[in-house]
Amino acid sequence: IYEREGLESLADIIEWWIYHRMQPSGEYGGGWGDDCEMWRWWVPVLIGFNSPKITAAQRRFSTALMSQDHMSGGYTSRMSDVEHTAEDSADAITPMMHIDVDDEIWKKRALRLVELMEQRWTGRNKRGFLQFKSTYFTVDRVDADPHRACDTVYHPRVVQPALLYWQRTGDARLGRLFGEWMDTWVDAAVRSERGKPAGIIPTAIHWPDGRIGGLGPNWWDPRNHGEYTLYLYPSAMELMMHTLLLTAHMTGDSKYLEPIESMAEIRLRFLRNKPD
């Protein structure tokens, strides 16, 4: 009964926003970069049930956002850090891949992100591992500032729609790409470097040397962004853990579970030894 009441109340709130706040452009008044996040809280109704009004509103919003001039190349042309540049595409494409499962348009938009990852955003670091070259990039530019040159635990958001596509299709090309990228993070987790304990996933890996963290003095604070706490350990660790888990599931290789298991074991040891 309480679950039903909660779902009905959530649907009422969503519909209120649709009827009272949706503008002719399709946005809700907070700007595309913030409005696009709303779907994350709509999920229990948007994906769990077939609500034509809510589905239509999300379709209208996502289509409008991807039709904006700055999204014409399939990813934003506005330079910022990855936590922000990834939102306009990931938060527009991902919900539509749940709503319009067989629509080729959204599949192509997801695969466009793979193309950009392969051709522009990543490379082999000096350790021979595949990683993103920077925390700051757009559809056609990568910021080469050494202070910003970090792959981070936020980067899975960039390819979130493609990860969903891989999960559904088992596409071999995506399997190779994401497997090699996660190899980089498995290697980083097992290393004891710059004071980081072995078995802990760092929040950043520097490019092109592949060392733990950024150019900040501490491994847990890469200093790759002006907002001090945004990439501070543990930051968006769940994004990286979800990606490692998916990679283990899709490849059947348990090595991708090792960073998750080692962090759980370290936490357990800490709790056992923690004074009352």
Image (cartoon, grey):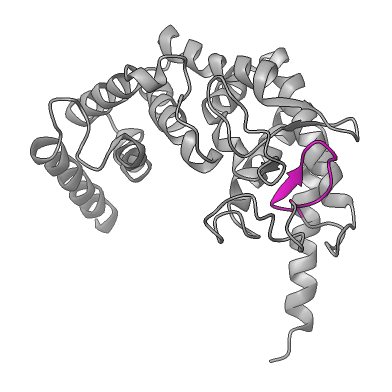
Percent x, y of residue 180:
79, 28
Q: Quadrant of residue 210?
A: top right
Q: Quadrant of residue 43?
A: top left
Residue 43 magenta-highlighted: no
Q: Nearer the viewer, residue 215 or 57?
A: 215
Relative vertical location of residue 126 with respect to residue 214 in this rendering, above or below: above
Residue placed furthest toward the left: 20
| Left or right, 275 with reference to 91 | right
Query: Quick one: quadrant of the N terminus?
Result: bottom left
Residue 213 magenta-highlighted: yes
> Is any atom of residue 61 visible in this view?
yes
Dominant SS of magenta comes to loop
| Left or right, 118 with reference to 43 | right
Residue placed furthest toward the front: 145
| Left or right, 211 with reference to 61 | right
> Is any atom of residue 102 visible in this view?
no
Tell me which segment is drawn in magenta: 201-214
Q: Residue at x 85, y 40 (%)?
A: 209
Q: Nearer the viewer, residue 3 or 275?
A: 275
Percent x, y of residue 22:
15, 34
Q: Residue at x 55, y 39 (%)?
A: 82
Relative vertical location of residue 126 with respect to residue 168 in this rendering, above or below: below
Query: Quick one: quadrant of the C terminus?
Result: bottom right
